[in-house]
Image (tube, grey):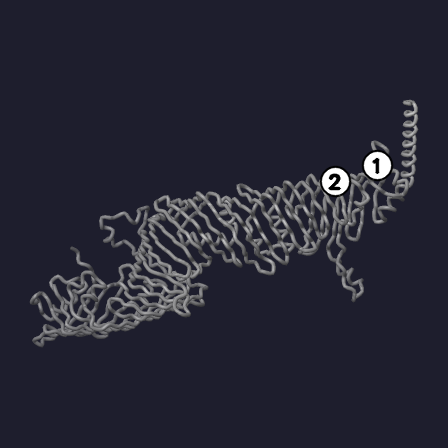
Amino acid sequence: MKKKFFIVSSVCLLFFAALVVASGIYINANIEDITRKHLGAGIQFEDVEFSFSPLPAIAFSQLKIQKGKHKITIPSLVLYPDLLALLKGDVVVRKAVVEEPLILSDRTAKPATEKKKLHASAPASPPAPLTTAAIPVGLINEIMIRGGKLVMISGTENMPPLTFAVAVDNIAKKDQTLSVEVKDFTIDEIGLSFAGDVAITSFSPLGLKINASKAAINPAALKDFLVKFDFLDASVGNQIPRIEQVAAGGLQLTIDPVSGEMDLVSESLSFGQNQLQNVSVNLSKEKGYLLKCAKVLMDVGAVQGWVNENPKGKEALEQLFVKAKLKDLRASGKIELSSIDLKGGGKAGPGISGAMDLKTEGLKIHLVAENGREQNFTISQLETRVTFEEGKPSLQVSNLRLASSLGGTGLLRGTLEIPIKLKKVRFEATLDSFQVFDTAITLRAVKNSGEKLTFEVDLSGPSLTVLAKGQLQTPGREKADFWIRMTECRISRGFSGEKEGVPAHRKSNGSEAEDPARKDPPHQDFDFSAIKGRTLSGDASVKIFQYNDMPQVNDVQLTLACANNRAVVRGSMGICQVDLFVNAVLTAPNQLVAQVEGKAANMNLTSFMACFSRELPMFLSGRVSVMTSLFVQGQNTQTLLDSAQGDLMVTLKKCMVRKVSSLDYRLDFLVDMLNAAGITSLKDDAVDFRKGLAKVEIRKGRVILDRFSLSGPLLDVWGTGEFLLKKKQLRLAGQVRTALGITNDLKIDRVFQKKKT
């Protein structure tokens, strides 16, 4: 039995060997005809050879395939055929091994010289797309590709050259789709490198589906690709920060040339100390982009680096440095974003819409001031919901706690919109002796939705002190955007006085005040930048207002209309019992033009003088009336004084000057008048005047007395004169007449200087 089986097996083997030899002889004799018959006349090769060992195979060298303007070059192609099918005239390949194929897809338009040859009425047809139908994968059971490159050539801006290199284990084709399992797949132009499965529906335009457990993405290359192919608006692309490399896990990428959409889904994206989890991005030329992400962990230092790289972000940061007088700002810590759902672009425009949650703990901010002083702030807790509506963000802050390394804490809860819409704002803010370098802030502010904002702020620093209490609401009266009511507002600004490393708060022995070489502090220009580009209207009232050591202002009533980089202010107020009516125009960045009119009748002279001085009221009593009209313009307080021009009339009744022997230096000119009249002693050390009059013209730093007069039982005085504001110099010329009828000339030239004690 064994002998029979051996004989039968031997016969079969001899038959198979004979069949192989016969097939080899037949194939070698007719291989070129068979190849060209099944692969087409558009295929060229330098050499083709059939071999028996180690397995029957057909080897092509320098294979070239031409289809229209698309070319495929394969240095080496080895086919392992089905011999029985091949002897019948059918080409069935069990396996194909392709060495480093090069696919050239030329998408450039035909040159003008070729277009002229076409019929004038026939439009130029675009090049045929290079689809997977050009590859005879249906005749092959298994394909192995070792290396490779696809080059897509285009002379147009919207289709730049595209290349990718691939090392493939096997390829399967179903309908018009190639399913490829790759070890190493790289698409340089979209910055993608991965290992996994890829399904290619078209080479030009590129259509593919990628499923990879691990991948690497070059964000800069991907951004350029998306902008060039209109998946992403260029203005949005410019805002994307520069990131060197991103590692992806569980990546799925789909590019659909028919719908013009691109989908990217990844379980994780990580770069540096930053990580994104469960990311989904849909990009469409028509619909724009849709971004969803479960969680993002960001390093604050990296975010600050992106802000510095972005031109708009860098400009905003530099402006912050200038306004806050900072030299440097550094942040450290982590920010967590979650439940991200954003969309924008496409026909809807570049504005972002959507929402996300923001959370952080232990965020630290390090500040360096212009003078080199350093300070740290800590945001111990921040929980907020950020909502975007057509690019406008709003913040719903459930908890914000911060602390200063120099002392003080802060708390904020509420809902804010940026830019702030006061009517919708709802928040509660508290600062307890919060120290910012040399400035301490205590703040209480409460605003409920649709209600007034109630605030109380106390700010104290070396060059600025502010105390303000009141309420703010919007909208205010009809056709106004806001109204503000303040019970008290006091502002004190001064020169910090720091020089040669000596702090301003260090007290001197008093010699510095008398140093004649000491220079007055520079006059700071007004800052009206807040009105630039704003359209705003409203009214305000302040019960008590005081700026520096100027007279206190009472019952301020103002209306504001702001447009075209200008603000028009109209209103009334009371200063030292004088009713003033103001019309002013503020122009960005620092110009002020104002017209002031005032009047008051039969005021108490002692109270009136108390508004300007603590000392003068003890010397004067009586009644006074004032009428004035004044015009000023300039960019700081000094230029306003220099430009002042107008008229002033002062009338006195029943005026008494007391303590003449020890008069204040500002009233010494009265002693000069008594001396001119020859009066050396006074009963009760006082002098009475029944009435007095001074008509004044103000012209660019000069107070010109067109005429003045004083009439009393002891003497009468009349004449003209002037007062130089900068020099504090009074010049008077006129006459004095005693009760006996003696008239003498009067001439006074006095510089007001405080008497030394």
Q: Amino acid at mark 2?
A: Asn
Can you tell which quarter of the image residue 466 is in? Answer: bottom left
Cβ atoms under marks 1 and 2 closer than 8 Å: no
Q: Looking at the rendering, in which quadrant would you find the N terminus?
A: top right
Q: Looking at the rendering, in which quadrant would you find the C terminus?
A: bottom left
Residue 564 drawn at (x, y percent): 45, 67
Residue 607 visible:
yes
Q: Amino acid at mark 1?
A: Ala
Marking on residue 497: none
Horizontal side of residue 643 vs 342, given as left or right: left
Residue 76 visible:
no
Horizontal side of residue 280 vs 141, given as left or right: left
Residue depicted at x 73% and y 54%: 107
Q: Which residue is mark 2?
A: 170
Horizontal side of residue 550 vs 669, given as left or right: right
Choose mark 1 or mark 2, whichever is in front: 2
Can you tell which quarter of the image residue 259 is in? Answer: bottom right
Q: Say if 246 sits above or below 466 in the image.
A: above
Q: Secondary structure at mark 1?
A: strand
Residue depicted at x 58% and y 47%: 279
Q: Nearer the viewer, residue 656 or 511?
A: 656
Q: Nearer the viewer, residue 548 or 730?
A: 548
Q: Residues within 10 Å of mark 1 (few under 14, many from 20)?
A: many
Q: Secondary structure at mark 2?
A: strand
Residue 46 drawn at (x, y percent): 84, 42
Mark with earlier residue (1, 2): 1
Can you tell which quarter of the image residue 602 is in? Answer: bottom left
Q: Say if 309 sits above or below 631 in the image.
A: above
Residue 662 drawn at (x, y percent): 13, 61
Q: Which residue is mark 1?
A: 57
Alpha carbons under labels 1 and 2: distance apart:
18 Å
